[in-house]
Image (tube, rainbow, N blue to C red):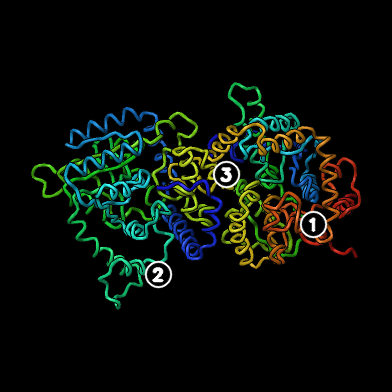
Amino acid sequence: MEQTTETFTANARRAMANETLQVELARLSQGFPQRRQQAADRMPEFEALRDQARDIKNHVLANLDLYLEAYEAKVIAMGGQVHWARNAEEARAHILKICKSVDAKTVTKSKSMIGEEIAINDYLEKNGIAPIETDLGEYIIQLRNEPPSHIIAPAIHVSKAQVEADFRRVHTDLPIDRNLDDPTSLLQEARGQLRDKFLQADVGLTGANMLVAETGSNVLVTNEGNADLTYALPRVHIVIASLEKIVPTLEDATTILRVLARSATGQDMSVYTSFCTGPKRPGDPDGPEQYHVVLLDNGRTELLGSEFEEVLRCIRCSACMNHCPVYKAIGGHAYGWVYPGPIGAVLTPALMGIDGAADLPHASTLCGKCESVCPVRIPLPKLLRSWRTRHFEMQPARSPGHLALAAWAWIARKPALYHKVNGLIIAMLGAFGRKKGRLKWLPLAAGWTSKRDFPAPMGDTFIQQYHHGARGDASGQWLRRQQP
Amino acid sequence: MAEHPGSAGSRTPVNHPSAAPDVGLFVTCLVDLMRPAIGFATVKLLQDAGCQVSVPAAQTCCGQPAYNSGDRKNTRAIAQQVIATFEAFEYVVVPSGSCGGMISHHYPSLFAADDPWKQRAEALADKTFELTVFLADIIKSSHIKAVYKSTATYHDSCSGLRELEIKDQPRDLMSAVVGLEVIEGEQAEVCCGFGGLFCVKYPDISESMLDQKIADIVATGAQLVTGGDLGCLMNIAGRLSRRGVATEVRHVAEVLVGMTDLPAIGAPEQVEN
């Protein structure tokens, strides 16, 4: 997917001017948080489960090499194959090679963020293979030729009316009087279109919510059942997953499942939860003939042992963006790459470099709501701040940011001078603004005054008044009246 | 909130304040410069609660602008100044959740384990409290005697709410104010879009967040918005004023002492009678 993190501010401005998007974002940030809260309230042990989920992921990250080897051995023992990919290019090459080996013409695909990360759809198309998205949201944005704007609700930026228009544009056999104005009829229409494609596909490509070392299985979670038709019907099943998706045991997988859907949609469990283990065995009535796992690193092992390691705990539930007031304002596309919201603001600089993505960790008030809902307790504000530090330390010492902070810090460490200088500035601002109570414009503060008035200071600073006696302004009068 | 043990409930000196606790007031740079009345209200609240209050003149800022910009070197230098200035007090009280959180939550993380400053930072962290937490949880005596005839809604500032778990303390204290009715906003816990330098670096995004906040405030019908952080309150007051909404804005310390004869934040000067 094309990276547009460098134009973050312009992306955001465009998103805030998009009225359709704003309506959908308002709906999303009401619904998901409410349902998550209700799900958590129904479960007294929810907070303890979050601790357990965090501990499982920490344990895996501390022993990732061992679990990856154990997982690979188990996949092979179950008749599958594992393909290691250091980067997106290698992952794409593995997938293309497998597709070509069975002369694939079409590939059905269930939702995968790693698929977005390696831009597999474009690559397959360029090589003459048609990728077909089978998740309703992904199907919609594929028709619109757009990237996802949310991890679990990829088409959240599209209104129902837009979907109807897209269907009528692309499904040319649709009768004009066919009713398409509610979600169910839209779903039925997409299902009707997809049914034959499921049956015709040569390869089914899925992601993985988890990879289980104990059994060599991949776990898939959906609400539409499309993943099951994607992996069960074609001759070949390819799983594409990043390597931190490993969990040790089925027991661990179920612990994480208990927090995943609750954090994501507020469901106790998603409608379909599937465990796929190897290809069809002799005597099995159905299933793929080949089972492949493409394991992608793409920079993740470099995060191990670094201050950013904790981001690898992420289970892609989307709770952080569902609760983020910045995401609510600007939506997912503004973040400029695959992963939006707070998790994207930490992960994108880690995978793509901080240079072109410096706005992401800065465009946050560090309000902490994301951390408070993260099912694996990733300290997102701390990690955002770590990126700011990393970025600050990369700037030359004479950059305007460095100089301004250095000047401010210099005077902040000379209290007597600080109070003298600020006292003069404040007296001046107070004289200008006190009568009206506000200043509509301030030099060097356009960022503030373009949107808000500047409440005028009272005129004397607290430290000056406290130590040298009030000078007779309003607060001083108040002080004198209060004292005996 | 992982790195520092101790939400308000678990700190050591908590349960046994001395007869006249020796309190150092860290007034915060915004209160010092923009609205000294909050400082005076805080002094009064602490004195009414039986504290011996000192205001060191060597205080400036807690270092958040540097910290949140990624400038660790200057943050540490400023933190050292604050630690040295305040470590002798029995308690340090701060009329701000974000500056209080900076000292009690983030200072210890600024220094390496073998740095002697680490211990000093932790010691200061353990005895530093946001104003309403100090009054409600540490001093615990009911000494609010104010009258404030109004309806108010309380904005939970983010650092206070999520780093220091400030929620009930200001509400409990306000319930003792005669004539004051508190109306909860549905979105009281949602960020107002201030975020320190965020609001000037990303004014458009901040505006969008701020307008949501203002819609929620207006929906309560309250005459007054109050809260524990002047940064957020200036942000809210500035936007209310720009949009011509008449809702008043005051820091919770002003409300708790019944300070009604001062113009509200961003409001014009009243004519003296």
Name, please, the residue furthest toward the bottom: A177
Identify the residue position indicated by label 2 in the image: A161
Which corner quadrant of the image does residue B224 belong to? bottom right
Name, please, the residue furthest toward the left: A283
**Residue A303 or A67: which is nearer the viewer?**
A303
Amino acid beneath label 1: Met
Q: What kind of element bears circle 3? A: helix
From what the image shows, is residue B93 above or below residue B169? Answer: above
Mark 2 Cα shell of 10 Å, populated few (<14), some (14-19), many (≥20): few
Describe residue B170's horizontal placement relative to residue A200 as left or right: right
Q: Are marks 2 and 3 on the same chain?
A: yes
From what the image shows, is residue A463 above or below residue A22? Answer: above
Q: Are marks 2 and 1 on the same chain?
A: no
Instruction: Compute the Cα span from label 2 to label 1.
Output: 53 Å
Identify the residue position indicated by label 1 in the image: B259
On what subunit does the disc labeled 3 rest?
A
Amino acid beneath label 3: His
> Of the numbered discs in the image, which one, if any, rests on residue B139?
none
Instruction: Say whether disc 2 or disc 3 marks the residue closer to the N-terminus.
Output: 2
Identify the residue position indicated by label 3 in the image: A362
Q: What kind of element bears circle 1? A: loop
